Amino acid sequence: MLRLITKRLFETIPVLFIVATLTFFMMKRAPGGPFDSEKQTTPEIRAQIEAQYGLDKPVWQQYLDYLGHLAQGDLGPSFKYAGWSVNELLWSAFPVSLELGLYALAFALTFGLIAGIIAALRKNTWGDYVPMSFATFGICLPTFVTGPLLLLVFASWLTWFNASGWEQPRDRVLPAITLGLYYTAYVARLTRGGMLEILSQDFIRTARAKGASEWRVVWRHSLRGGLLSVVSFIGPAISGLVTGSLVVESIYQIPGLGKFFVMAGFNRDYTMVMGTVLFYAVLIIVMNLLVDIVQVWLNPKLRFE
Amino acid sequence: MSALQKIEMLLEVKNLKTSFHTRNGIVRAVNDVSFAIAHGETLGIVGESGSGKSVTCYSLMGLVPQPPGRIEGGTAIFAGKTDLLNCSPKELNAIRGRRMAMIFQDPMTSLNPFMRIEDQIVEPLLIHGLASRAEAVRQAVQMLEHVGVPDAAKRIRSYPHEFSGGMRQRVMIAMALITKPDLLIADEPTTALDVTVQAQILELIKRLQAETGMAVIWITHDLGVVAGFCRRVQVMYAGRIVETAPTEKLFANTRHPYTRALQKSIPALQPKGTELYTIPGMPPDLSRPTGGCAFAPRCEIARPECSAKLPELLEVGLQHCSRCPFT
């Protein structure tokens, strides 16, 4: 097991290198630059700014410089936020997004699993149709619809929550639901499918023949196998959840990571684009590794391969 | 023998009707089946695929998936008290796995691949509160050794995929018998195994039956297995019992044309070099009941009236019944 993990961690180095290289050159190919939106500047001032950030050097030189800094964990200075490094910006916003993401994840897993299991056990009855209809809505409705709707109902009409902000614990509720709704729906559908597949297996019949209660059939005999597909989904989903969402952050005025992902591209904030892409890549890789470990733990057949 | 019938039966099934409600109509898989089995007795239920022999036993164990399945009627009195078909799930769960156990056709898929053998074998003891965990494990190891799994103390920690088919069926048997049930239902437990292993498993169950005195219902399509193992046989066709008799009588004095045809299909009983006999035609579509004898379209001695009226299951000898008035 330890060997597998070390091997996989070493494999991430070439992957990150390829991601960094592709992103770097694609970004450079994109028209425009980080200082195009500045007020009219004289060519001299512009040249000076570009020299300061090393943009006057040939592209391959810039690339090598970047890789050199990257190897030391330095993502460089932000082009947009003067005086800030990308590392500082990411680390200041990440805790907020992480917290929100984990709440959303907890919400998604709790309600998604319960709804999925109930739907599987009540297959083709109202106990199945009702949660699965909600799940279809949850998958279809984008956050820029559900967010304002939740705000309208729970903040404006019922005034249970503040409309925006990130101070009190209860400020976390609406954003977490908005962000987690899609994942809840997806988890519910995957759980239902996985559980239905397992519940139709011969070994479930064996368990019933032993006199096992329905509770025992679900918990001891079905859940492990039934959740394999949920686990595969939830790994990459966590990466998405904890890196924030521009829409949710804008609706609720949350100082999270999501805005950097989108705005860095618009601003041609070269180092920030690189930083967010690499950050996301590392998260995806780590999460997939975790998924693989959990899969092996869940499925004994994989342990010998 | 008639004195035996006065003794309380272990299981008495009367007028069992099980059907499946499908898109293509109602499939009457088990139609008005009645039989009884005494303590320690061995009953063979023989028939081809779809004859209702498995569904009969699944109905008794409460394992028919509902929907689409439905128990339309009948009673099954277990040990003179509980009606398996009409009792509460709690009452049923108190019997199945404890007093009535079942082993299945395919040991490859009937064991949970996500659980250790140990956890699966001790489960009946724990569910029914018959032993502590430690005591259950001790009994499980003992039981595994008893059914011929070598190095049981160590192998009990394995997962099913680390076992061969024959070993898995031994595990299934150990699991079914660990509570010392009064009745074992064996649903073609040797079909998925190769021939030498088949013989071993058969011998094993025979031996365990002699030791514990349990009754066994043996479901099979193999008349040969029945001949060597069962005291009594009932033959099913299209969801109904067509003939039932003590084994030696069934073979010596076969009455129903379907049983005769089955017997003719046993390769070993035919002279070498002759072409293998097969029953012409196809099993009937159970969603379209004919009203007459279901076997009539394939029967060599069928008469016009066979398709018009369903023949009764009539006594043709001592403990010998047949559903054909013309033999």
Image (cartoon, grey):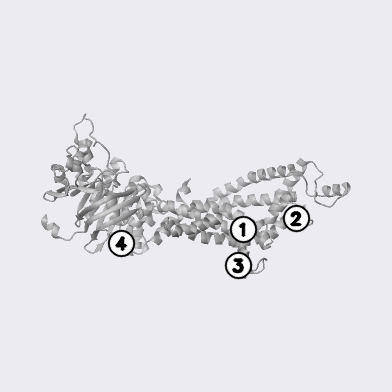
Q: Could you tell me which chain the residue with mark 3 belongs to?
A: A
Q: Nearer the viewer, mark 4 or mark 2?
A: 4
State which tag comes first along the sequence, 2 or 1.
2
In the shown orientation, is residue B234 left or right of residue A122?
Answer: left
Q: Which residue is mark 4?
A: B92
SS of the residue under disc 3: helix
The location of residue B46, given as percent across then percent down, is 23, 46
With B11 as the anchor, is A31 left or right in this view?
Answer: right
Residue ranking furthest to the bottom? A159
Q: Do labels 1 and 4 touch, CB within 8 Å? A: no
In the depicted structure, whether residue A249 falls above or below residue B109? below
- Secondary structure beneath label 1: helix
Give the residue type that dot 2 points to: Ser
Q: Earlier in the sequence, mark 3 or mark 1?
A: 1
Mark seen at residue A145: 1
Residue mark closest to the camera, 1 vs 4: 1
Tell me whether marks 2 and 1 sit on the same chain.
yes
Amino acid tagged 3: Phe
Q: Residues within 10 Å of mark 1 (few under 14, many from 20)?
A: few
Mark closer to the observer (2, 1): 1
Mark-to-mark CA distance, 3 and 1: 14 Å
Residue A271 is left or right of residue B68, and the answer is: right
Q: CA distance from mark 2 to mark 3?
A: 38 Å
- Badge 2 or badge 3: first in the primary sequence: 2
Give the residue at mark 2: A85
SS label for mark 2: loop
